[in-house]
Image (cartoon, helix red, strand yellow):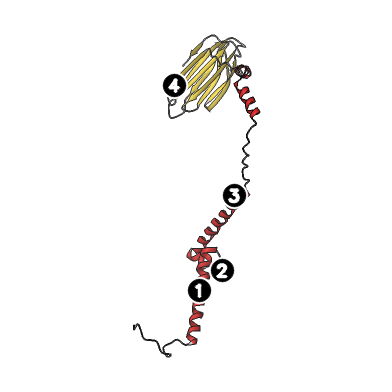
Amino acid sequence: MYNTDMPNRAELPSTGKLIRSTLLAAVAATVLLVTVVLPAEYAIDPTGAGRLLGLTDMGEIKQQLAEEAELDRANAAAAPQPEVPAATTPEPEAQEIVAETSAEPTDTAPAAAEAEAPAPEPAPRWRDEVSFTLTPGEGTEYKLTMEEGAVARFAWESEGGPVNFDTHGDGNGNSISYEQGRGVPQDEGDLEAAFTGNHGWFFRNRNDNDVTVVLRLDGDYGELKRML
């Protein structure tokens, strides 16, 4: 069967051409290795061409991923393997003893647990509790009638934002300011009357929204009244 003509000797490339082609191929392969393969695979860029082509960044990412994978494998190999305890079969006599013990009544356990459990703390009891809402810029005042030296326990908190307050007293020509605060969300403590008169709190809402204040009181005082 005829496919093609065989080339004659004159058509075959000479030895010099083969050597030149081989050298050119080797040079081209070396150039590709230095400018493309090494930067892209190993982040090695001796000529700087890989950085310009964006291949060095790719190689750095590959090397980082390879290092992390190797570190994960090393950590997994170094992690201690959990020991699986061998299954043991108790002796027949031991099984009978366990069965008899578990069948015995344990009426004393609940009683012991109840005896060890701490008694719940009683919830705080307040003599008075008032809740009021202040619109933006609005203020109000609550005071207690108190004798000199009397002590009232108090706790208040605001919902919707902090408030400004002034704890003060007046009466019989006397006046006093115990404490002032700006942007305070809550407070608690004892109020001791410095003299006989009215003692309490003035609250003002400086927020852009309504604020609800809850005031709780207990102790030695006569009457709780809203002044404003």
Of mark 4 and mark 3, the one earlier in the sequence is: 3
Relative to 207, is 218 above or below?
A: above
Circles 4 and 3: CB atoms closer than 8 Å: no
The tag earlier along the polypeptide, 4 or 1, is 1
- Residue mark closest to the camera, 4 vs 1: 1
The residue that appears at 54% across and 56% down in the rendered structure is 65
Amino acid type, label 1: Ala
Q: Nearer the viewer, mark 2 or mark 4?
A: 2
**How far apart are the alpha carbons under marks 2 and 4?**
75 Å
Q: Residue 151 location in percent, x, y?
A: 60, 13
Q: Secondary structure at mark 3?
A: helix
The x, y position of residue 138, in whole percent, is: 44, 23
Q: Nearer the viewer, residue 75 or 62?
A: 75
Q: Judging from the image, what secondary structure is the residue with disc 1 in?
A: helix
Task: Find the distance from the CA under tag 2 to the CA under tag 1.
Answer: 16 Å
User: Which residue carries the number 3 mark?
Assistant: 76
Label for residue 160? none
- Name the residue located 51 percent from the left edge and 20 percent from the top edge: 202
Q: CA–CA distance between discs 4 and 1?
A: 83 Å
| Amino acid type of the residue tagged 2 in the rendering | Pro
Residue identifier under label 1: 29
Q: Nearer the viewer, residue 182 or 23?
A: 23
Q: Is residue 49 above or below residue 20?
A: above
Q: Nearer the viewer, mark 4 or mark 3?
A: 3
How crowded pointer 1 is (Cα within 10 Å; few <14, some 14-19, many 20+) is rated as few
* Amino acid type assigned to the residue bearing label 3 in the image: Ala
* Marked residue nearer the N-terminal end (3 or 1): 1
Kindly identify which numbered label has been placed on residue 46. 2
What residue occupies the far bottom of the structure in this picture? 10
